[in-house]
Amino acid sequence: MKKNNNNLLRVIDANINRYKEGIRVVEDIYRYIYNDKNISSTLKSLRHIKLPLSQKELLQNRDSINDVLKTSTKSEQNRKNLESIIVANLKRAEESARVLEELFKLIDIQTSEKFKSNRYKLYNVEKEIILNLTTQKPE
């Protein structure tokens, strides 16, 4: 990667964090509240993605202190129930997967395709989760 791509790495770092954090929230809800090994395992496998960049490369370009949009919006602070948390975090992960898919086209096409595949897997998990939420009760 060229040295002048620091801002690109910053965007990638932010979206990898969003992607993994969004998945982790839903994974933990399904692991600890619903005791659902199937969905938890699927989400865990989606979260563990091998990157062609080192953690050091990403961290060197991180500037979370100066992030112009780090303050939460009212809608981000408002969650009514577990379903709203699940939906918000699945959407967060899906959107980040799309950004990563596009940006990795500039760096590594295989990683781009992996994020595309994972995005579609997230869509399927989302469908399974949302369609079953009305019948599934926390244990």
Image (cartoon, rainbow, N blue to C red):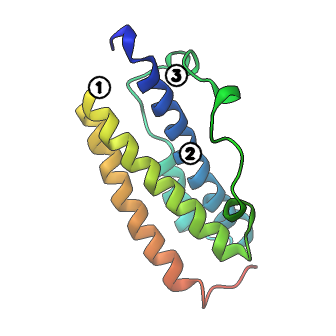
Q: Which residue is at 58% across, 20% downward?
A: 59
Q: Quadrant of residue 87?
A: bottom right
Name the secondary structure under disc 3.
helix
- Residue 14 lies, in percent from the top left, at 54, 36
Q: Work out whether 15 lies above or below 106.
A: below
Q: In this view, does 122 lie to the left or right of 84?
A: left
Q: 90 or 133: which is nearer to us? A: 90
Residue under pointer 1: 107
Q: How far apart are marks 1 and 3 (CA)?
A: 13 Å
Q: Earlier in the sequence, mark 1 or mark 2?
A: 2
Residue under pointer 3: 58
Q: Is residue 104 left or right of residue 72?
A: left
> Which residue appears farthest toward the front when viewing the image?
68
Q: Distance between the residues labelled 1 and 2?
A: 19 Å
Amino acid of disc 2 = Arg
Decide: few, some or many residues near mark 3? Use Cα within 10 Å; few <14, some 14-19, many ≥20. some
Q: Which of marks 2 and 3 is nearer the N terminus?
A: 2
Residue under pointer 2: 18
Name the secondary structure under disc 1.
loop
Residue 108 visible in the shown view = no
- Residue 21 lies, in percent from the top left, at 61, 48
